[in-house]
Image (cartoon, rainbow, N blue to C red):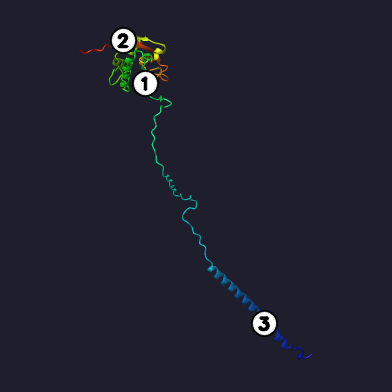
Amino acid sequence: MGDSDHLLPLTPQRKTNSGDNGLKFTKKFVCLSVSLMFAVVLFSSSAMSQDRPRVVKTISSQPTNLPPAAQPPTLIKPASRPVLENQIVLVKTQPTQPLVKKTGSSMPTNAPMAANRTVYGTGVSVKLDQAIKTRYGIHYRYGSTGPTSYDCSGFVWSAFQEAGINFTRASVRSLWAESDPVDGDERYKFGTLVFLNGLGHMGIVADENGFYHASSSKGITYSPFKGYWENRIVGFRKLKPQAAVPAPVAVKQ
């Protein structure tokens, strides 16, 4: 073999180098295209984020759990009254008697003035009734016989004196001893004397329901037997006949 057998052909070597160069160019172009596309995508995303409106969450300085504000009261306009077109005619009615009598009065409603309901007759009883009513409400004072204050026996003595029946002013116990006892219906005739509280108090019977007396808290007043005084009654009496005779009236000459 000679030297010419070891020489390589030149043409195939040039073709290989040209192919390698083309492959390298293609890779560079692809990388550049990818980079360019990535940059375009990033730029587009940034632009879109800037154009999107921002939502700003406002933070209130007021607490979120406050009760609802009170509503102002609603004023209701009153309905207007209808206008009366008919003529009003006033009709006077006659007063009628009440069906039930008022019993809350401190005075008896039916003070008996008939002769059979009194101890000393109608004339004396009328004067005695007037004497009691003129003293009604005058305050109590122990040992007094009037005219501005009375105790129980002083009231009885003064009222009978004005009615024309004279007797000696005395204590309750003395008047009990000087009077005559009565029983039955006689006890509740107007003018009868009633003795109470172990002969420590006395009064004048009005009727079967109560009596007049000088009360230490109310003065001259009327009190019912039922209730407080019911179990404090000692007994009923009337003045002796000589004491019950009205005093003679002096005749002027």
Q: Amino acid at mark 2?
A: Ala
Q: Residue furthest top?
A: 242
Could you say which quadrant of the image residue 24 lies in? Answer: bottom right
Classify 30 as above or below 150: below
Q: Are marks 1 and 2 in contact (CB under 8 Å)?
A: no
Could you say which quadrant of the image residue 207 lies in? Answer: top left
Q: Could you say where residue 190 lies in the image, as x and y percent from the top left?
A: 36, 16
Would you name the residue on which mark 1 appears? 222
Classify 14 as above or below 127: below
Q: Amino acid at mark 1?
A: Tyr
- Quadrant where the N terminus lies? bottom right
Please tell me whether mark 3 or mark 1 is closer to you in this view. Answer: 1
Q: Residue at x 53, y 69 (%)?
A: 51
Q: Residue at x 54, y 70 (%)?
A: 47
In this rendering, position of residue 155 left or right of residue 76: left
In this rendering, position of residue 136 left or right of residue 101: left
Q: Nearer the viewer, residue 179 or 234?
A: 179
How many residues crowd around disc 1 within 10 Å: few (fewer than 14), some, or many (20 or more)?
Answer: many
Q: Could you say where residue 113 lies in the image, as x and y percent from the top left?
A: 36, 17
Q: Residue at x 36, y 21 (%)?
A: 222
Classify 34 as above or below 53: below
How many residues crowd around disc 2 within 10 Å: few (fewer than 14), some, or many (20 or more)?
Answer: some
Q: Amino acid at mark 3?
A: Gly
CA gap, disc 1 and disc 2: 25 Å
Classify 22 as above or below 216: below
CA gap, disc 3 and disc 2: 170 Å
- Callout 3 secondary element: helix
For marks 1 and 2, the one nearer the N-term is 1
Would you name the residue on which mark 3 appears? 22
Q: Residue at x 57, y 71 (%)?
A: 44
Would you name the residue on which mark 2 appears? 243
